[in-house]
Amino acid sequence: MKTTRQAPLLFRYHVRMIDSLIIGFDRALRTLSGTVTSTRPSPDAYLQEAELAPGERRHAAALMRVNHTGEVCAAQALVARDPAIKERFAAAARDEEDHLAWTQQRLDALGDRPSLLNPLWYAGAFMIGIAAGFAGDRTNLGFVVETERQVEEHLTGHIDRLPASDAKSRALVEQMRDDEVRHGAMALEAGATPLPAPVRYLMRRAADVMRAVAYRI
């Protein structure tokens, strides 16, 4: 039987969860409809557009489509229990929305489109984020640390793979990588629990599949 003191706390928790679900649903609609706007100027705003050969343009666009899909997949803040951790996640989520807007703008400039499978990627990442959140804040933070470590690796790889003359795409990816490194350090500092090796391996393989498919579709 719940005590008189527990009942208001439980009510407030459910109200916060409902608010979070509404916010999450709104973010999902904006993410998948391509209407997310950035709060920071795009890092490539003052750089000149390069003349790219058709093959270079297609390759740069495919890499940016992968990066756009990666930003579509960020959704861990919904079920954080600790208000301080939830606020940190919310700050990171604002950066991810910047990334999403920047990569969408870059795809438009390159004359290409986001992945056709973004609703599927979003749903999968959302469910993984929910599961990590319900496993506890420290596990959720560990999930963030590992995710950001892997994202940092693949963004560094994209910097090397982008056409040498595509300074605009390179500026975006470099800023995104710096932000992801900061997010990972934040989660580690907040008390992340390292994930078991099999979980890290499965995350890496799932990310490999996503990148390979999003590059083409």
Image (tube, grey):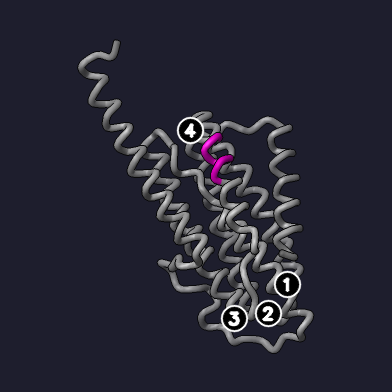
Tell which residue pokes out farthest to the top in this image. Answer: 1
Q: Residue at x 32, y 33 (%)?
A: 14
Residue behind mark 1: 162
* Mark 3 or mark 4, whichever is nearer to me: 3
Secondary structure at numbered mark 2? loop
Q: Helix or strand or loop: what does disc 1 sit on?
A: loop
Residue 12 lies, with reference to residue 34, above or below; the image says: above
Residue under label 4, please give it: 137
In this picture, residue 77 sits left or right of residue 126:
left
Label 3, label 4: how far apart the Cα atoms are: 39 Å
Residue 167 is inside the magenta segment: no
Q: Which residue is mark 2?
A: 166
Task: Name the quadrant of the N terminus.
Answer: top left
Spatial separation of the CA atoms under disc 4 and disc 2: 40 Å
In the displayed structure image, the side of residue 24 where residue 210 appears, left or right: right
Residue 72 location, x and y as percent? 56, 57
**Is label 4 in contact with label 1 (beta carbons under 8 Å)?**
no
Boundaries of the magenta span: 126-131
